[in-house]
Amino acid sequence: MSLRARISTPEEHGSRGEDGHLVAAYRAKLLEEIDLAEMGALAAAERRSRLERVLGHIISREGPVLSTVERAQLIRRVVDEALGLGILEPLLEDTSITEIMVNGADAIFVERGGRVEQLPLRFASADQLMQTIERIVSTVNRRVDESNPMVDARLPSGERVNVIIPPLSLTGPILTIRRFPRSFTLQELIGLGSLAEPMVYLLAGLVQAKFNIIVSGATGTGKTTLLNALSGLIPPHERIITIEDSAELQLQQSHVVRLESRPPNVEGKGQVTIRDLVRNSLRMRPDRIVVGEVRGGESLDMLQAMSTGHDGSLATVHANSAEDALTRLQTLASMSDVEVPFVALHDQINSAVDVIVQLTRFADGARRITEIALLDSHGGEPYRLASVARFAAEPMTADGRVPGAFAYFPLPRRTADRLHMASQPVPGAFGVARTADQLATREAR
């Protein structure tokens, strides 16, 4: 993208009264005084610094007379409008914000600490918002217009961006930016209350013993964060292939191959799906396959990989409970272009999936593991889930918190034997069931 495309002129934006006119006027003066060719050769930080200096000279020369704070604010706003993303720029720099939601020009919401709040900010007009959206999507060589009114992409800095515009959106251009999640260890997640120490020991043993694990939860429950933390338990000598729609995983091992799907271009060609990548990964000699999210026919390929020698694979799925996760996997696998009877898919899931880790986001914004369930059924048997850890939530307190406690249940003998063969201990908080009656089991269709 050219520098002139990044630096706006007054006509490109609406205004917010006198303040908006002032910003637009100084943006025009800034454009007149800079050398675009010279600026284009500078790095982003140097370019911003140079623009701030030039604008400072303009204000000193031509006025108006401003206080130090007012001067700094004006310089920041003009440069943000000219070079950055305008009023969104400070929000992107605020590390406490995990999601930015723009519902048309007049409504901007953010998520902080799991809670959504509306900010007293607005774009001058829908046209100004569209200019910002076009600037964002152009950085990833995409375009948004009436013929292509939806865009889902990952910015070079890592944020995931979703755009939908009229006529599909009836409330004006909609922009959602999800902040690239910071990598957390399981010990850090204990500090956040997401799980407890006995669960860490159990999950570490399950990963080391190459159990196939599905992380399940609704949107925003922290599935990717937990998947990343679990991936950190994979031994460093193993070859790991990660497959994602928008690359978010940040594995620290040295032998990691990262694959990312590709949407079709403006002509509708060149698409590479998650399913294509899963199939290709099987030819790359993986020790582990980590799929950021299964949401279609690739579920069948993933299940086949899990049940044919690629043990220790990890994936996430959108579901509201462990039972729902199994049903959803079966439904997604049926969406494959290979017609497989539902009964056969049922058998495949019983053979492939070992563990389901269910995540829930509570009303106070806390994200917690609410269940660790082991799939203890075989072949054509109904799904039988043995719950080994649960979070029992209590009513919300006066200060808005949702308290509760983790409870632990015995492991099935088959799971304990498999851990033992992998030299992994059974954490004392769980123990091993001597009879089927000691298991916290339930059947699912």
Image (cartoon, rainbow, N blue to C red):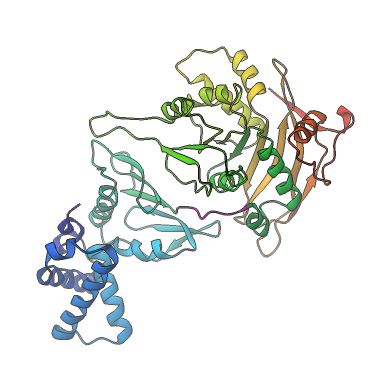
Above or below, comparing residue 291 to residue 305 in the picture: below
**Relative horizontal placement of residue 168, taking residue 14 as reference (left or right):** right
The location of residue 62, given as percent across then percent down, is: 13, 83
Residue 293 visible here:
yes
Among the 4 quarters of the image, the one containing residue 223: top right
Q: Which residues are magenta?
A: 180-185
- Residue 118: x and y in percent read 45, 61
Foreground pick, 13 / 441? 441
Number of callouts: 0
Quadrant location of the C terminus? top right
Residue 32: x and y, percent? 10, 69
Q: Quadrant of residue 227?
A: top right
Q: Residue at x 82, y 40 (%)?
A: 409
Residue at far left of view = 32
* Residue in view at x 63 percent, y 44 percent: 359
The answer to if 182 sits in the magenta stretch is yes
Establish if 99 lies above or below 285.
below
Is residue 16 in view?
A: no
Q: Residue at x 17, y 55 (%)?
A: 5
Left or right: where 395 falls relative to 330: right
Residue 370 in the image: above or below residue 294: below
* Residue 102 x %, y %: 37, 54
| 276 or 295: nearer the viewer | 276
Residue 35 inside the magenta-drawn segment: no
Q: Main secondary structure of the magenta part?
A: loop
